[in-house]
Amino acid sequence: MTAGSADAALDPRAVPRAPILVLGLGNLLLTDDAAGLHVEAALSAERGVSAQVEFVDGGTQGLSLLHYLSNRRAILVLDAVGLGAEPGSVHVLRGPAIDGLRVQRSTTAHEGNALELLATARLLGDVAEEIVVVGVEPARIATGIGLSPQVEAALPEAIERARAVLDSMLRR
Amino acid sequence: MAQRIVVDPVTRIEGHLRVEAMLDDSSHIHDAVSSGTMWRGLEVILQGRDPRDAWAFCERICGVCTTVHALASVRAVENSLGITVPRNADIIRNIMFLTQMVQDHVIHFYHLHALDWVDVVSALKANPGATAALAQKVSPSWPTATEGYFKDVAGTLSKFVASGQLGIFQNAYWGHPAYKLPPEANLMAVAHYLEALKWQKELVKIHTIFGGKNPHPNYLVGGVASAIALNGDNAINIERLTMVKGLISDAINIVENLYIPDLLAVASFYPEWTKIGGGLGNYMCYGDLPQNGIGDVAKFRFPRGVILNKNLSEVLPVDPADPAQIQEEISHSWYRYPGGKDALHPWDGVTEANYTGPKPPFKQLDENKAYSWLKAPRWKGQAMEVGPLARMLMGFASGRADYKEVVTAALGKLKVGPEALFSTLGRTAARGLESQLAVHWLMDEYDRLIANLKGGDSTTADTQFWDPATWKPESRGYGFTEAPRGALGHWVHIKDRKIANYQIVVPSTWNASPRDGKGQHGAYEAALIGTPVADPKRPVEILRTIHSFDPCLACASHVFGPDGEKLVEVKVR
C-alpha cells in the first residue's frame, strides 16, 4: 500500500490483530437504536480482553470504522435490525440474508450505514470470510437514553444468540 | 409548466435532509425549500446532568464528527467555569481537530462528492494505458500510475459492479449527460478514491493515540485525557509521537499529491459551476486553532468574523456571548418558544417541539408555514453560510498571507478570478485548499507539542476547578469550533452544579436553515435558486450544490431494514 505507510513497523507495541471482531453499532441517544451496543457491552464484559476477539463500540460511525474491519477472519455485527417483525424479535442474518437486505435497501438513499461499510470493505478486497449480524427488532426509535420494555426484555435472548455465534466463530 | 422536484434525502451520510426545488418554465430553479425531517432534541437529554460529562453525550450526536462536538462542549463548560487549559492541551486538541478536518475533507471529496462529478460506470470504458499517462500528468508525484495498476483497478471495479451490489455507488445518476469527464479521468478518480479510503483508515489512529480510543475519543474538562511521558512506557511516549509524525507526513502526501491535483483536474472540466450555486454571499466563522489560548482570538489560525454581501474588504466582528448577535428563529420551524417569542439567543434557547407539518409520508411541504425540524439561526438578523468557503474567504479578507497564497495559486491554475469562489465549485475548491493549509498546520502543531514537551512542560490538564464545590452557584459559557462543515457552537447554563440549559447550533443548522420571519432563505435554499436542471427526474445539479456544503444532519438512526424511514418515530413533546 502506498499511502498510510505508518504501519505496524512504526508501532513498537502493535499486537497481532484479533481474528474476530465484534462490532456494536447504534446511537446511544436514540433508545432502541442502541440495542446492539447493549449486547456488545454485555458480551465484552463477560469475555474480557482476549487475543482472539476484539470488541468495538462503533456508535454510528461510518468510514472511520473501516480499519476495524480489515484483516479479520470473522465479524459479528450487533445492531438494531428492523424487518417489520414483532418488536424485540432477535434476528440472526448470514451471507445471503445480509446481501438481500442490501438489495432491498438500494431503493432508499440512506447510506453511511453498516451495510455500506461492509460493501466498502468488499470493494477494497479486504473482507472477512464470515460475517454474521445479530440484531434486535426495535419498538421505538426516538431521542432518549435507555431501551423500550420490549427490547429490554429481549436482551437476554439477543446476548445468548450472539454468544452462540461468537463461540462457533471461535471453534473454527 | 412549473414543476416541483423533491429530493429526500439528499445526504449520502447520516441524517435526514429533504430539499424541494421549484422549476420555472425554462427549467431553472426559481425557489427552494430545505427541511430537516428528523427531530434531534439532544439538548433535552443534557438537562440536569453533570456539565463535566456533557462532552461524552455530545460525541454521540453525530455519525461523523464525534470530536468536534466534544471539543465545543468542553470549551463551553470551561468558559462557564473560568478554566484555562494548559498549553499542551490546546495543542493536542488542535492536533485532534486538524486530523478530523483533513480526514473528513479528503473523504468528502472522494467518497461523498466526487460521484456528483465522476461517472463510475464510464470508468469501465477507460483505456488503462491512457489512464496511466493522464495520471502521470495530473499527479506526477504519485507513484501508482502504471497501466497494470489501472487495469487491476478497472478489474476490481467491474467485478464490484457486476455483483449487482453497487452499494456506495448506487445513488448517483450514471450516464447523465451532466458528467463531463472522459473515461480515463473517471478511472483515475476511482483509483484515487480507493487509495484515499485505505489511507483514511490509518490517519484516524492519531485520535486513538491522543484520545485513548476511537471512535469516541476521550475528552476532559480542564485539558486533555492524554498522559505524556516522553521516555515512559505507560503513557504517550516518543515512540507513539513518532508514529503520529509518520501519519501526518502521509496526510501531507495525500493532500498535496493526490487530492489537490485531482480536485483541480476535475474542476477544470466544469467551468460553468463557478457561476452556479453561490447563494447568500454572507459568511460567518467563529474561528479556531488557538496559538495562544482560546481567549486570544486574534491569534487563531482560522480567523473569526462575518463577511456580508461578498464584500471581501470588510470583516465584521462576531461575539457569541452577545444576546443581540446570534439568535435562533422559529417562524418556519416545528418548535415553540415561551411567551410567543420568535427568536432567542442560545443561552436562553428552548427546545420544545411543536410539530404542525403534514403526516408523513407527504408529497410536499408548505414553505409558508413551519416546515423544518431545524431552527433558523441568524447573525444580527441575517442568514449566514458557514464552512470551508466561509473560512477561506475570512482568511483571505483578513489579509492572511498563507490563505492568499493557496487561493491565488488555485485560481491561477483554473484561470478564473476571485468571483469564481462564490459558487458551488468555489465551495468544493475551498475545502481542498483548506485541507492544504490544515495538513501543514497539523505538522506545525506536532512540532509545537514536541518543543513544549522538550522544554519540560508535560502538564495536560488544569484540575483547579474540577471539584464542583469550587464552582459559582450559577454561570454561563459558550464553546465553539470550526467543524469540517462550519461554525459549531455550544452554549451552557450551569446552575447548582448541574446543566440548567444546553443549546447546540450545528453548522448544518446554519446552512440548511429554513426561512426566517422576514422570509430570508437559508444558505442551501439561496444557493439552489437560479440553477439550471437538465433532467428533473435526475436532478444531479441539486446534489452537486447541496453536497458542496457537505451536509450532515446529525443524529440519524442506524437501523438495518427494508425501509429505514418507516422505523423512525417522531416523538413530539
Image (cartoon, rainbow, N blue to C red):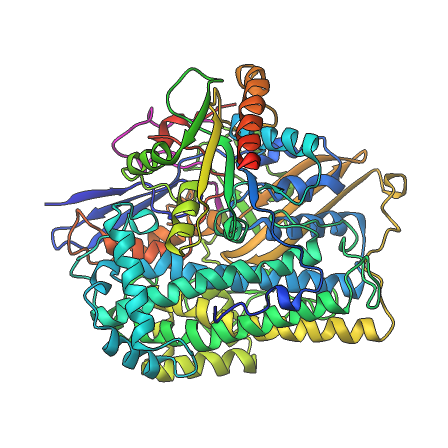
Would residue B29 be visible to someone looking at this image? yes
Of B453 and B46, nearer the camera is B453
- Residue B502's spot in the image, x, y percent? 65, 39
The residue located at (72%, 65%) in the rendering is: B240
Q: Is residue B109 left or right of residue A65?
A: left
Query: Is residue B364 within the magenta segment?
Result: yes
Of B329 and B234, nearer the camera is B234
Vertical placement of residue B573 versus B451, above or below: above
The residue located at (32%, 75%) in the rendering is: B265
- Residue B465's spot in the image, x, y percent? 86, 48
Q: Is residue B347 left or right of residue B527?
A: right
Q: Is residue B551 left or right of residue B242?
A: left
Vertical placement of residue B428 versus B500, above or below: below
The quadrant in which the N terminus of chain B is found is: top left
Q: Main secondary structure of the magenta part?
A: loop
- Residue B24's spot in the image, x, y percent? 16, 50
Vertical placement of residue B67 versus B417, above or below: above
Would residue B274 be visible to someone looking at this image? no
- Residue A64's spot in the image, x, y percent? 52, 52
Report the residue that reaches farthest toward the front: A172
- Specify start and end residues of the magenta stretch as a single range: B354-376
The residue located at (31%, 70%) in the rendering is: B150
